[in-house]
Image (tube, helix red, strand yellow):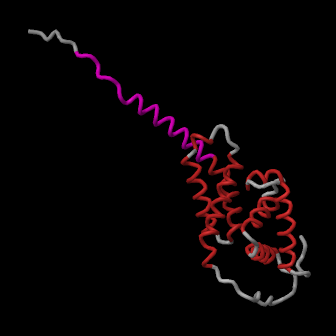
Amino acid sequence: MTDTHTSAPAPVLGGWSTARRRTKAARDAEFTAFVESAGTRLRRSAYLMCRNWHSAQDLAQQTFAKMYAVWDRIRDDTNLEAYSRRVLMNAVFDQQRRRSGSELVLADLPERPDLTPPATPELRLALVDALAQLAVEDRAVLVLRHAEDHSVETVATILGISASAVKMRNARALSRLRTLLGEDFPDR
């Protein structure tokens, strides 16, 4: 006796998950390309804000983690460069608020061992040290305006403040830097 029942093919369940995997892979590849293009810039800005490469790396990673969580929402209609700067600055501000009670403030600055103009690495270290003595908001303005070379309007948008506030903070922070660095510091 022959079996007259024909078996219908089993439904293909793997098709939906394969398409979903492809979509996720494309999304991840897009995000990876963004991280590769923006990573160095974000780490450099974070370092200028906190003076510690390890913290800068952590801040950049926090920025990327927060962006990855909302990547589907922001990837098409958002200026990713500006968005990443804003997320980074928020992370820096949050870190500063958490650490502000643990800092040790000294009454006197350390003695300068020698008054000869510093070479390029020493010049950078002196600038980074002086930058660290500024308020975190002033530091953010200087980093975005001078290290990243953004316009006043762009900095205002990134930080969520007015253009006049950016100009005021910039002038005040530059004046404070000049005071901290002294008269005989090379103006390069």
Q: Position of residue 119 (x, y in %)?
A: 83, 77
Residue 11 is inside the magenta segment:
yes
The quadrant of the image that shows the C terminus is bottom right
Task: Write the start and end of the magenta stretch as one range.
Answer: 7-33
Q: Is residue 48 above or below residue 61?
A: below
Q: Is residue 35 above or below residue 58?
A: above
Residue 12 is left or right of residue 74, and the answer is: left
Residue 119 is inside the magenta segment:
no
Q: Quadrant of residue 26?
A: top right
Judge by depth and name the residue closer to the eye, 9 or 88: 88
Residue under the point 70% across and 49% down:
81
Tell me which secondary structure the magenta stretch mostly adopts.
Answer: helix
Judge by depth and name the residue closer to the eye, 16 or 116: 16
Residue under the point 23% across and 16% down:
7
Q: Quadrant of residue 146?
A: bottom right
Residue 118 is left or right of residue 129, and the answer is: right
Q: Is residue 138 above or below residue 21?
A: below
Q: For the view shown, which residue lies furthest in the left direction?
A: 1
Q: Position of residue 94 (x, y in %)?
A: 62, 64
Q: How many marks?
A: 0
Residue 125 is left or right of residue 88, and the answer is: right
Residue under the point 77% across and 66% down:
138
Residue under the point 70% across and 67% down:
49
Q: Position of residue 43 (x, y in %)?
A: 66, 61
Judge by depth and name the residue closer to the eye, 151 or 185: 151
Q: Position of residue 78 (x, y in %)?
A: 68, 42
